[in-house]
Image: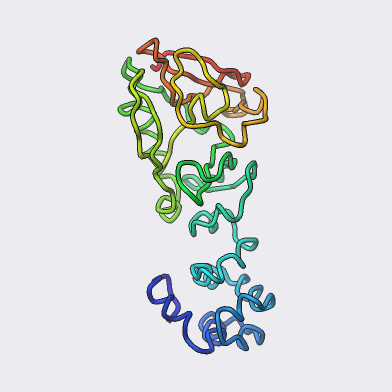
Amino acid sequence: MLSDDESLNEWAFRQPNIGSIINTAFELNSTALSGCTTVQQIAANTTAITAISKNTYAMKVCAKNATLAPKFISYMSDEMALKLGYGYLKYNIGAMVTVNWYGTPLQFRVVHKNYLVSNKIVLLSENIIVSIPWNSAQTNTYTTSTIRTYLNDNVLKGFADEIQNAIIAPPLPCHNGATAVTCNDKIWIPSVTEMGYGTKDYAPDEGTVFDYYKNLGQSSKVKTLNGTSTIWWLRTPDSGNSGAAWCVGADGSLDGNGVT
């Protein structure tokens, strides 16, 4: 009766003696859980919640119930929290989150909450994962750029299907040269504005500064590739040079480079 089918679960969680049903379905052997007749009683019973949390599949199913979900946040792995869409509840600004990418655990930092969409977090890779051109063509048109295509194809596919499905594509402010456009992408690189560099000539405003970077200096923006501090791309084009885009220097300073 309990499954990954949300409509089925909505009905199941309204049944009398739901605690006993969960206890039997997942063979949890919990007297405390079995004695709960409603979802509300389960949520109020710490022993029952602990019993469910010890079974990953039971917790995954029960966490889809709005009343029970908040009770499992502290028990969830990073992967489970993201798959179920509870990253907003689990993490604060600056928290580190570990996610498997093509089977390799990578670290991401929570840099903002409620950015462009409500009840979501923005995760920024703690370090550089690959080295590619901003655009293999000599133009700083972001919508058709090499890096945008790579991010939303190769990079996105490296995450578990459930995480891919949980990621929201916000209305992201971007530019093709000096022309403002909106991109609805699941994976994207930050802008000059978002990284807290302020207003710069030939760097169009794109979004607002991420909360994590509001009170941090240049060194907080340094990222490494294979252990070496390396420049990394921002999505902001140089509006005064059609063949250039902005990037973060190896020392964390704002820099620019040819897109190829």
The spot of residue 102 in percent (x, y) is: 46, 45
Give the quadrant of the C terminus.
Answer: top left
Q: How many marks?
A: 0
* Residue 17 in the image, given as x and y percentages of width and height: 54, 89
**How is the model colour-coded?**
rainbow
Above or below 13: residue 113? above
- Residue drawn at x 48%, y 27% as measured from the top left: 191
Q: Nearer the viewer, residue 137 or 206?
A: 206
> Based on the displayed image, in which of its 4 quarters is residue 224 positioned?
top right
Q: Position of residue 174 (x, y in %)?
A: 39, 28
Asked whether, in this view, residue 1 is left or right of residue 36, the answer is left
Quarter of the N terminus within the rendering: bottom left
Determine the residue positioned at 67% across, 29% down.
216
In this view, the residue farthest toward the top is: 241
The percent coordinates of residue 232 (x first, y second) are 52, 24
* Residue 60 to residue 232: above or below: below
Is 240 located above or below residue 3 in the figure?
A: above
What residue sits 33% from the left and 29% below the top? Answer: 181
Q: Is residue 238 left or right of residue 28?
A: left
Residue lying at the far right of the rendered structure: 47
Seen from the viewer's position, the closer of residues 91 and 163 is 91
